[in-house]
Every structure is written in structure tokens, then in C-alpha cells.
Image (cartoon, rainbow, N blue to C red):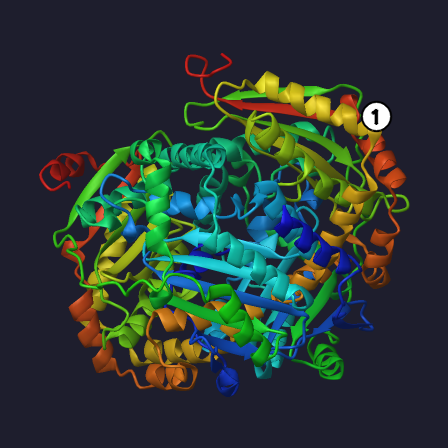
């Protein structure tokens, strides 16, 4: 073990937190209410320009699931000024790349382009904030495209369909249980009026956040933002109509069998507070807990389930807390060899019980903090993921100082905090346990 | 996400290029022991990224032992020297570093990320991993099970299945015919000796390319090159004689009960060092490489709504050039989608580009050049990719000029040379409608 000893020594010397180069971040708000954040990165003469709207699939009216995402597709059709089908082509002809994505809490549009084209892409994005032109003839073809997207992501794979059923079971009432892309049957009847209604209500400067990352100065971004976005009138935003989530009183269980399942697996999830809704440092505690449980092969789940007991091919846990209304804490594992899903569930239950009884150790917590801080440093290498991090955080309702104080909050987490967070969240009556299985004749546990 | 194909295509295009004003920042450094690396010093973030690529990869697998290189690759991090896999992982963890190993059809590569303050200790770990891997029986069985599980998953993944069949039928006998991870049969039969033998062939200084970007001084780097790689075996370069590529078109349908069929298609293409590569690259951007702006996307997606993703790309392997494409579409729309793709293939072969298309392609390809260099990780990737492709160190200075020099005549000539709609070999996995006759047709031409 000599090699290990010397490496460990070196590591303890480095256990003091690594030197942190803070990203250079500034912000401003336009008079019409549009927020803006500038993340400076002068390594290459390019920018990432993003506009985030505080509207996602969780804001869709009943019966219209998928409309937020469908509208995102239609936003590329053109405006009164930009000819039909030309939006992305103009960006490309200027050496840029563009795309968009829709989530439960937000819809975001972005371009990556040479810095001297920032004004151009802002003018185009500002134009389609209020002046999109969706032709009736676009409606059917683009809806078919969305259905093919759904086929690719979900319907063609048993894992995708299982995941959708699991999410629907996890949330009793809140729209987070609805797939972002929408239920197939409802996508098929979405139309132009549905899209425009969503657009009129939510696409406005006072419901948007601008993120510019790259080789720019805050002053020039502000001047350009005032010129292009500052002239757009704010609208009266609708009251948030999101459903609340009632107390969870009964553990729920799912079983799905499919002949196309090649690898059986178990999923166990719990609703948890999010970074926005948590008290104190519970979100940070849950994030550290997920690292202690599965942030590498030395962590609890992989070590016990794949190495020590040889029960699983893989095993892990995650906390997903970047959400406006609530987060999720979940475990997953795939059985190995003759292991059955109930046996694997038993091992998982034992580990959870042990965690709730004995908590985590100081050493585990220190390792988790260290890897979280290092991950933040590595994240700075990617301009677009920095832009995404800030965009998502602000859109769900976090403030810049919360992001800036993240490290302090994280470092203040104690083993008692982690134990308290685990005990608050990992309650049997809140749980959903799903088995994805082969058909009975083939299944090892059938 | 609006574009799936864009992300896919991006990983498949030619070696990326750097922003021109960054050109002079790429240095070639050589250690006292004679090991060379391409290096960009970048101190704005306290990290160092290193990539090491060895020519070879799965082509070094022996007949019947396919997947040995891949399995050996997966085992390097499973213990080395006096560390077992837990010790090794803990040591990396303590350094907040990561080391990844991967194998492809033509190469074996290593990616290292380290905080700059820990780069010496991280490279020390890499050295032990590469020179003293344990390949314990316990780890072999565990990783073998993971590989077999992945292979089983691919059997139910229409896209993976289509790709596997395409390569199997297009390459028949060469190593390209088999997936990098091998087959269930070959992986099951691999012994520890097979894995040791494969590993012995994979690592050779004569076939090593290194790229480094980050917060480190050139002197410190060259010293590290010697301590990390100095005692690797010298080995020898590989013969790159092209292998045979299927020359005839055809259609294979593999029936799977899914709502959407996956289609992989293509035919012979050109190698990376072909003088026509740049004009072909420009041509492909317009045909099916340009994400939301390509002809294929216009015809198949935008006008008809037949697919979410449809694309084409140049796939220059070391010993075979390929021109490939794909689409995923509902079973009842496969025939129509394929008809449109063939039409576009033929239209380009016959008519080339319009001036407007050529101009737009050039402004995109030259203007977006810098986007490939906005992170240390991307630049490191380029430094190694460019060396592997045999490009000169000043390629970033000349690349936009090469694109700008492409004429309409160049593209017409290359399109005619490259695109053969009748030679397209097509694999469909799903339950496509109206393609029964095609299935019987394949009987005669399979393999």
C-alpha cells in the first residue's frame, strides 16, 4: 500500500480547498422588468446568448400537455420581419449555432456566435419575443415532428416509458408529473390557437431573463439589451395557476413488464424540497448526501451493491433540486446475475435504514464537499454550461447572491444537517418504487 | 431540444479547428526524453486537461477475440500497482481529478482533468495505471458483466442495432465489421491472457499523440511527459492500407416491435487525407450536416414533418472512408422518408450547390470556427484530433482559407464522385410499412 499512502498524504495536503477562480458575473434589470446576467469569459472571441422565459410544461392548461414545448418548436418558424423558415438559417449564415429547450419550469432559446454578432442575435430574439408568425400550414408538419421526437425519446424505449409512468406516480397533483413533451394523445390535438395563447401570456420582457456569457463587457451588453429588449412593453402576467401537492400518505408501487427490456431495474424516488423551497441548507445537504451515496465507485451504493455484495451491475442515487416548486431524491439499481429485484430492493432498504439510523461520517461529508467544489471549478471551463446554470437558477427563482453564497452554504453543512435532511425526505409513505421487468416467462423473478 | 441531429453530427465531423488569433498559442513541446505534445497554456481557470490518443483501438483485436481491447480499456482503472480499484478511485477522488479511458474503432484514448495544483500527483496515478494494471479476475468478471449487459441493451435499441448491422454488412471481414465492444459470444470467451495480450498491443509510444491545455508551465509539462510516458513500450506504427468496403446498394429490414423505425444508410466515402475532403465537407454541410439548415432537414423535417432528426456525415475511419446518414421516423413513413433522402442524394450528385448555398455554407463553416475553441476541453480534443489526422500545427491558420477556396465546380465534381444514390446500403430496424419486397431482396446481398 505504499503508493496509496504517499498519494493520500499528497491529498491531505490538498484537502484544504482548491484555489477558486470566481467567474466574473454581473447583472442589471431593464426598466420593463427584464433581468440580465453577464458572465465574462475572454478565452475565445465568442458569446453565448440566451433568453429564458419563466414558463414550462408545469404551466400548461389542463388538456394541453406539450404545448410549451410545441410552442418552442414553432418559435423558429419566423416573425413579421424574419421570413418563414429563415431564423436558424440567418444565424448559421453568420457563423452561429442556435437551438432551444423546454423544461418543467422554463423555456430557453440560445445562440452561440462570434462576439461581433451579438447585436444581430439580440435583435432577432427580441423580435420573436412579441412578433412570432406561425402559419396555419406549419401546424401539422411541426406537430408530426414533435410526435417523432416523442417516439425517439420515449415511445421507442421501455426505459423511457417506465420513467414517464414513474414521474406520473411520484406527483399526486402537481404538473411536474406530466412529461415535458406531453402525453401523445394530447399532443395530437394541439393547434395554433393553443400555441398563440401560451405565447401571448408568457412571452414578455418582464417574464424573461437574458444571459450573455463570453467575450463581452457588462456595459456593452447593457447598451445592446436596452436597444433591443428595452423597447418592448411589459405585459400583465397571469397569476401562477400551478397545482399544489397534497401530503403523501401511501407508498406507491409500479411494475412494468415489456419484452424489449434487456436489463431489469429498480427505481425508488421521493419528493424533496428544492433549492427554492427548502429551509436552511436542506437542498445543499441533499446534494451532498447524493454524492456520499453515489458520487463514484468508492461511495456507499456502488461499493456495497456492486463490489461488496455483488448484487448489482450498477447502483446510484441523485438529487434533482433545481426546480421552482419541489425536487426529487431517487435511488436506482440494476440486478446482477441471479439477484432478483426484491432482493435488490431489500439491500437498498437496508442501506436507507442504516443511513437514517447512523447518518454519515465526517470523512464522507468532507469528501463530498471537496468534490462539489472541484466540480464547480471544472464547470467554469464550459461557457454554455455556465450560462445554463445561471439561467436555470434565476428562472426558477433563485437570486444571484444565493448562487454566489453557494460555497459558503455548502461548507457550513454538518453531518447533523445531512441526517436531518435524510430523515425529512426518505419517508416510506412518500416513496414510489418501480420495477422495470422482462415478461413473466423470461424474468428471473417471475 | 429542437435538434438531436446537430449534437450527433457535431461529434462526427472532421477534426475541429481553432480561432485564428489563437493559432500562435499552440506550441509543440518536446521532453528531454523525446516525447512530444501539443500544448496551449491557459491560466484563467486553475485546471489542466490532458488527452492522450494511441492509434489502434479495436482494430488490434484478433479474430474471435473481438472486444478484448474494449474490455482491457474498462479494466485499467480497476486497480494498478499496489492499489485495488477502491484505492485507485479514492486516490483520484482525493485529488479531485478524473481519468477516463475509452476505446474506439481506430484508437485508444485517455482523458485527464486535474486541478493545476494536483497535476503531478494525477499524472503519477496515470503512470501507475498504464504501466502496472492488475487485471484481477474479480475485476475482469465484474466489468465483463457490465459489457455484456450493454450488449444486451443494444440488442433492444433500434438505432444501435441498425448501426451494428450496417457495419457488419459493409465491412464483412475486417475488424470494422464488429462493434468495438465485441459480441456476446466473443466477450464471454475472453480470457485474462487475451486481455493482457490486447493491452500489450494498445499502448505504444510510436503511436501516441498528446494534447495539453491549462494552467501549467511548459517546463513542468515536459518533465511530466517523461515521468508519465517515458517507460511505455516503444511499439511500432500501424499499417493503414485501406480495407474493402461494400460497393453495392441494398436494403436490410430487421423487424422490431417499435413505433418508430431507425434507419442507418450510407456508402463508400473518402479518407481524411483525400484532397477532396474539404469540398466534400462543405457539400455535406448543405446536404445533411448543417442541423436545422440542411437540405435533408428542409425536405424531410420542415416541409413534411416526417422526422425529428435526419442527417448525413462524412465518417473517415483510418482505413476506410464512409459517407453515412440516418433518420428516425414512424413505421408508416419510412418509405417516404427514404425516397426523399435518395432524391436529395441524387439532386446533389447531379446539380451540386447554388451560389447562395455555397456562400451560406462558407460563412457558417468559417464563422463558427471559433465556437470549437471556447473551452479547454474542446481545445485539448482538437490538439489530439489534429495530430491523429496528420494535420500541420498551423492548420488553424489555414483551415478557413481552405474552406473559402472551395468553388461551385469543386463541389459539383466531389458530389458526383462521392454521392451514389444507387449504392446506398440501408438498414431499417422497426416495423416499416410497404417494404416487404425489400426484405426478400436482401437475401441475395447480405454479408
Relative to B264, say whether A14 is above or below: below
Q: In the drawing, does residue A116 fall left or right of residue A89?
A: right
Q: In the drawing, does residue B243 fall left or right of residue A175?
A: left
Residue drawn 16% across and 60% down?
B420
Q: Farthest residue toward the left?
A: B444
Crowding near the residue tagged with mark 1, few <14, some 14–19, many ≥20 C-alpha atoms within 10 Å? few
Is A269 or A231 nearer to us in this picture? A269
Residue drawn 49% across and 18% down?
A338
Is B43 or A11 nearer to us in this picture? A11
Residue drawn 35% across and 77% down?
B391
Residue A126 occupies which quadrant of the picture?
bottom right
The secondary structure type at the circle numbered 1 is helix
Q: Is residue A352 visible?
A: yes
Relative to A152, say whether A353 is above or below: above
Residue B152 spot, x, y in % from top left:
39, 32
Q: Farthest residue toward the front?
A: A2
Relative to B311, say whether A105 is above or below: above
Residue B26 spot, x, y in % from top left:
49, 82
Disc count in the image?
1
Please name the residue that numbered disc 1 is placed on: A357
Could you tell me which chain the residue with mark 1 belongs to?
A: A
Q: Is residue A53 visible?
A: no
Residue drawn 78% across and 25% down?
A354
Residue B386 spot, x, y in % from top left:
39, 73
Residue B438 spot, x, y in % from top left:
17, 39
Is B362 or A382 nearer to us in this picture? A382
Amino acid at each position: 500500500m505504499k503508493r496509496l499512502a504517499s498519494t493520500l498524504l499528497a491529498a491531505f495536503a490538498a484537502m484544504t480547498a482548491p484555489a477558486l477562480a470566481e467567474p466574473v458575473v454581473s447583472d442589471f434589470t431593464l426598466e420593463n422588468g427584464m433581468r440580465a446576467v453577464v458572465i465574462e469569459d475572454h478565452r475565445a472571441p465568442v458569446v453565448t446568448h440566451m433568453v429564458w422565459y419563466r414558463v414550462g410544461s408545469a404551466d400548461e392548461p389542463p388538456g394541453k400537455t406539450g404545448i410549451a414545448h410545441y410552442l418552442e418548436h414553432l418559435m423558429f418558424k419566423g416573425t413579421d420581419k424574419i421570413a418563414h423558415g429563415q431564423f436558424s438559417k440567418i444565424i448559421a449564415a453568420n457563423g452561429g449555432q442556435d437551438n432551444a429547450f423546454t423544461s418543467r419550469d422554463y423555456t430557453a432559446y440560445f445562440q452561440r456566435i462570434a462576439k461581433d454578432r451579438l447585436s444581430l442575435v439580440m435583435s432577432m430574439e427580441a423580435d420573436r419575443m412579441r412578433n412570432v408568425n406561425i402559419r396555419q400550414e406549419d401546424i401539422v408538419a411541426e406537430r408530426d415532428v414533435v410526435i417523432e421526437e416523442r417516439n425517439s425519446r420515449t415511445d421507442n424505449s421501455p426505459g423511457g416509458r417506465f420513467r414517464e409512468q414513474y414521474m406520473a406516480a411520484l406527483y399526486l397533483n402537481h404538473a411536474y408529473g406530466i412529461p415535458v413533451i406531453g402525453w401523445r394523445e394530447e399532443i395530437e390535438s394541439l393547434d395554433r390557437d393553443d400555441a398563440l395563447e401560451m405565447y401571448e401570456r408568457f412571452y414578455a420582457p418582464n417574464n424573461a431573463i437574458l444571459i450573455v456569457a463570453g467575450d463581452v463587457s457588462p456595459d456593452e451588453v447593457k447598451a445592446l439589451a436596452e436597444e433591443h429588449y428595452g423597447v418592448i412593453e411589459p405585459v400583465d402576467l397571469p397569476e401562477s395557476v400551478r397545482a399544489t401537492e397534497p401530503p403523501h400518505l401511501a407508498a406507491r408501487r409500479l411494475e412494468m413488464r415489456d419484452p424489449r427490456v434487456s436489463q431489469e431495474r429498480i427505481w425508488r424516488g421521493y419528493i424533496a424540497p428544492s433549492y427554492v423551497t427548502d429551509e436552511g441548507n436542506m437542498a445543499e445537504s441533499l446534494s451532498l448526501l447524493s454524492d456520499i451515496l453515489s458520487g463514484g465507485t468508492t461511495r456507499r451504493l456502488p461499493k456495497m451493491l456492486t463490489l461488496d455484495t455483488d448484487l448489482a451491475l450498477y447502483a446510484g442515487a441523485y438529487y434533482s433540486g433545481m426546480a421552482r416548486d419541489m425536487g426529487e431524491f431517487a435511488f436506482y439499481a440494476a440486478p446482477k446475475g441471479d439477484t432478483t429485484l426484491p432482493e435488490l430492493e431489500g439491500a437498498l432498504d437496508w442501506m436507507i435504514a442504516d443511513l437514517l439510523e447512523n447518518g454519515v461520517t465526517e470523512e464522507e461529508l468532507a469528501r463530498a464537499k471537496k468534490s462539489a467544489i472541484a466540480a464547480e471549478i471544472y464547470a467554469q471551463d464550459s461557457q454554455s454550461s455556465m450560462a445554463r446554470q445561471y439561467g436555470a437558477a434565476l428562472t426558477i427563482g433563485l437570486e444571484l447572491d444565493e448562487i454566489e453564497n453557494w460555497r459558503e452554504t455548502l461548507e457550513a453543512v454538518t453531518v447533523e444537517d445531512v441526517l436531518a435532511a435524510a430523515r425529512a425526505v426518505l419517508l416510506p409513505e412518500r416513496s414510489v418504487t418501480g420495477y422495470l421487468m422482462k415478461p413473466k416467462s423470461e424474468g428471473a423473478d417471475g | 431540444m429542437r435538434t438531436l441531429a446537430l449534437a450527433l453530427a457535431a461529434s462526427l465531423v472532421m477534426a475541429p479547428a481553432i480561432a485564428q488569433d489563437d493559432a500562435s498559442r499552440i506550441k509543440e513541446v518536446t521532453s528531454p526524453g523525446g516525447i512530444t505534445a501539443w500544448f496551449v497554456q491557459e491560466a484563467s481557470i486553475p485546471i489542466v486537461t490532458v488527452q492522450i490518443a494511441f492509434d489502434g483501438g479495436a482494430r488490434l483485436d484478433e479474430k474471435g477475440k473481438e472486444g478484448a481491447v474494449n474490455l482491457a480499456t474498462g479494466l485499467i482503472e480497476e486497480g494498478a500497482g499496489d492499489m485495488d480499484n477502491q484505492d485507485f478511485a479514492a486516490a483520484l477522488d482525493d485529488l479531485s481529478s478524473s481519468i477516463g479511458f475509452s476505446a474506439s474503432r481506430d484508437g485508444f484514448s485517455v482523458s485527464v482533468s486535474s486541478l493545476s495544483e494536483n497535476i503531478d500527483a494525477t499524472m503519477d496515478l496515470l503512470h501507475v495505471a498504464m504501466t502496472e494494471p492488475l487485471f484481477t479476475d474479480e475485476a475482469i468478471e465484474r466489468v465483463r458483466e457490465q459489457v455484456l449487459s450493454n450488449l444486451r441493451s443494444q440488442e433492444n435499441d433500434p438505432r444501435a442495432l441498425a448501426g451494428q448491422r450496417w457495419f457488419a454488412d459493409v465491412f464483412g471481414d475486417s475488424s470494422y465489421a464488429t462493434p468495438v465492444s465485441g459480441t456476446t459470444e466473443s466477450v464471454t470467451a475472453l480470457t485474462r491472457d487475451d486481455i493482457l495480450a490486447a493491452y500489450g498491443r494498445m499502448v505504444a509510444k510510436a503511436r501516441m499523440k498528446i494534447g495539453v491545455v491549462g494552467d501549467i508551465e511548459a517546463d513542468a509539462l515536459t518533465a511530466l511527459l517523461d515521468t508519465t510516458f517515458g517507460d511505455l513500450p516503444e511499439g511500432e506504427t500501424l499499417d493503414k492500407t485501406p480495407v474493402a468496403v461494400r460497393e453495392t446498394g441494398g436494403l436490410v429490414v430487421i423487424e422490431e416491435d417499435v413505433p418508430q423505425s431507425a434507419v442507418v444508410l450510407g456508402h463508400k466515402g473518402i479518407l481524411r487525407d483525400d484532397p477532396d475532403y474539404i469540398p466534400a465537407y462543405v457539400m455535406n454541410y448543405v446536404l445533411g450536416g448543417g442541423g436545422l439548415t440542411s437540405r435533408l432537414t428542409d425536405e424531410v423535417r420542415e416541409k413534411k414533418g416526417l422526422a425529428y432528426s435526419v442527417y448525413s456525415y462524412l465518417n473517415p475511419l483510418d482505413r476506410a472512408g464512409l459517407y453515412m446518414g440516418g433518420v428516425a421516423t414512424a413505421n408508416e413513413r419510412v418509405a417516404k422518408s427514404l425516397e426523399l433522402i435518395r432524391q436529395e442524394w441524387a439532386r446533389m450528385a447531379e446539380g451540386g450547390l447554388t451560389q447562395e448555398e455555397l456562400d451560406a455554407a462558407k460563412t457558417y463553416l468559417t464563422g463558427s470556427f471559433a465556437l470549437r475553441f471556447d473551452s479547454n476541453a474542446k481545445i485539448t480534443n482538437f490538439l489530439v484530433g489534429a495530430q491523429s489526422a496528420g494535420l500541420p500545427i498551423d492548420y488553424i491558420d489555414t483551415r478557413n482559407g481552405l474552406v473559402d477556396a472551395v468553388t461551385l465546380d469543386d463541389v459539383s465534381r466531389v458530389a458526383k464522385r462521392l454521392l451514389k444514390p444507387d449504392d446506398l446500403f440501408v438498414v431499417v430496424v422497426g416495423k416499416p410499412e410497404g417494404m416487404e419486397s425489400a426484405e426478400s431482396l436482401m437475401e441475395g446481398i447480405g454479408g
